[in-house]
Image (cartoon, helix red, strand yellow):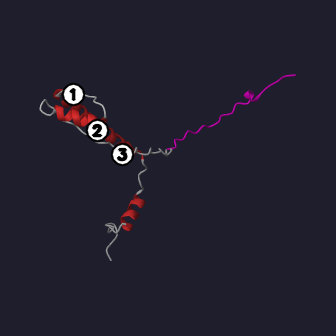
Amino acid sequence: MMVSNCSLVPTKKEVSITTKALERTIIQPVMPREIDLKEPYWYVVSDKNIDEFLARIEKDQGQIVFFAMSVPDYELMAYNMQELKRYINELKEVVVYYRKVTVPQPSEEEKKERKISAGIKNPLKESE
């Protein structure tokens, strides 16, 4: 007994390759809520008003604790805050850019319908 398979009969199969563009739906993340900053109260204390300041703080707060900062350190803190603001604004621009390029663009027909429905005269239509 002899066992054989289809390889004895040569056949050619045609393979067709097609490219199909797939439209991806990219989910846009929800933008974070805006920041809610609280404003601290700053005391300017010098040797002329330190006694009054100490009495007021002890009366209002019950104890005296200081967080001191020199003028150059305050300027450094102000610079750092500006750097944070710049960085956040640049990140926001990146997010807005990617949101624009990943949201599906309306077709030409949809654009025309929007213009007409918005009350804008369609320049492609002849005036009546």
Give the residue displayed 60% in from the left and 37% down from the top. 15
- For residue 121, what is the image quadrant? bottom left
Residue reaching furthest to the top: 1
Work out which residue is located at the far left of the displayed protein and give it: 48
For disc 1, the marked residue is 69
Residue 19 within the segment the image draws in magenta: yes
Residue displayed at 73% across by 27% down = 7
Q: Residue at x 82, y 24 (%)?
A: 3
* Amino acid type at mark 1: Met
Query: Mark 1 or mark 3, which has the lower sequence index?
Result: 3
Which corner quadrant of the image does residue 43 belong to? top left
To which residue does mark 2 refer?
60
**The residue under label 2 is which amino acid type?**
Asp
**Which residue occupies 37% across, 47% down?**
100
Q: Position of residue 2 (x, y in %)?
A: 84, 22
| 86 falls in the magenta region | no
Judge left or right: residue 128 versus residue 2. Answer: left
Picture coordinates of residue 32 (x, y %)? Answer: 40, 43
**Badge 3, how many Cα within 10 Å: few under 14, some, many 20+?**
few
Q: Which SS class for mark 2?
A: helix
Q: Which mark is residue 98?
A: none
Q: Which mark is residue 34?
A: 3
Magenta-highlighted residues: 1-21
Q: Position of residue 107 (x, y in %)?
A: 42, 56
